[in-house]
Image: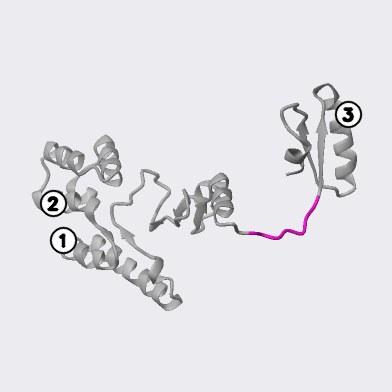
Amino acid sequence: LLDEAGIGGDDEENLVSLIQEKNFLGVEELLESLNIDKHIADVLLALPQLFGSVEVLEKAKALTDNKECLAAIDRLYALYNLCRITGADKYVSFDLGELSNHAYYTGIVFHAYTFGTGGGRYDKLVGQFGREKAAIGFSITLDSLMAAITRQNIDIPVDIDGTLLVYNSDRLGDAINVSKKLRSTGVNVCMIEYKDSKSDSQYIE
């Protein structure tokens, strides 16, 4: 749609940000200032409101005859049908205003909601490091993940152990040497400086 409207540079960046923020008035003001084709402007203006169940795709399809847009919507339908086969469709919603300023996203952008997790498609990113490969990836904020696990009282058994080496600040050199020796024998070692404000039970935790 941006290509068809001839929108680029700072205007493109601002418009994408406003749509992603669902800033309807901001999108409207910017589009009015650009003086573009009214039909395309109406479609762009609708994007912040196009979120919800699979019916959103049908609404989007009725808004445009742009071949690339229609192909993108068909691809989302295909992905949704795969979700139906696996039974995951009940967890899926669509947001056509979910855009990104990151150029390395080349397809669907997704968010998996517990708290603060998300990812996307990166078909061109790996090629910047010397090997053309399609890829898909995601990030997880560990603090948010741990908070979600704790809040839901999820117990994850682990079969690893190790040693916590608590040292006084004036014995850092000794602590490093002891850690090196233990690690050389295969022992996992975590070092932490001793503080009067912490109890033994807190260090054990």
Foreground: 63 or 3? 63
Secondary structure found at label 2: helix
Q: Does the magenta stretch include residue 100?
A: no
**Circles 3, 1 touching at the beta carbon (< 8 Å):** no
Viewer-side label of 3, 2: 3
Foreground: 195 or 187? 195
For residue 80, side relative to residue 174 (left or right): left
Residue 155 in view = yes
**Circles 1, 2 touching at the beta carbon (< 8 Å):** yes
The structure residue drawn at horizontal position 88% and vertical position 43%, both measured from the top left corner, is 182
Q: How far apart are marks 3 and 2 (CA)?
A: 69 Å
Q: Position of residue 26 (x, y in %)?
A: 20, 39
- In the picture as drawn, the residue positioned furthest to the bottom comes out as 85
In the picture shown, does residue 146 fall above or below 86?
above
The residue under label 2 is 42
Q: Distance between the residues labelled 3 and 1?
A: 70 Å
- In the picture as drawn, the residue positioned furthest to the top comes out as 170
Secondary structure found at label 3: helix
For residue 21, side relative to residue 147 (left or right): left
Q: Where is residue 13 in the image (x, y as percent from the top left)?
A: 29, 39
The numbered mark at residue 63 is 1
Q: Which label's residue is closer to the chain start, 1 or 2?
A: 2
The structure residue drawn at horizontal position 13% and vertical position 36%, both measured from the top left corner, is 33
Q: Identity of the amino acid at label 3?
A: Asp
In the picture shown, does residue 136 fall above or below 45?
below
Q: Give the range drawn in magenta.
A: 155-161
Q: Which label's residue is closer to the chain start, 3 or 2?
A: 2
The residue under label 3 is 174
For residue 47, side relative to residue 101 (left or right): left
Q: Which label's residue is closer to the chain start, 3 or 1?
A: 1
Instruction: Categorize mark 2 by other alpha carbons within 10 Å: few (<14), some (14-19), many (20+).
Output: some
Q: Does the magenta stretch include residue 160?
A: yes
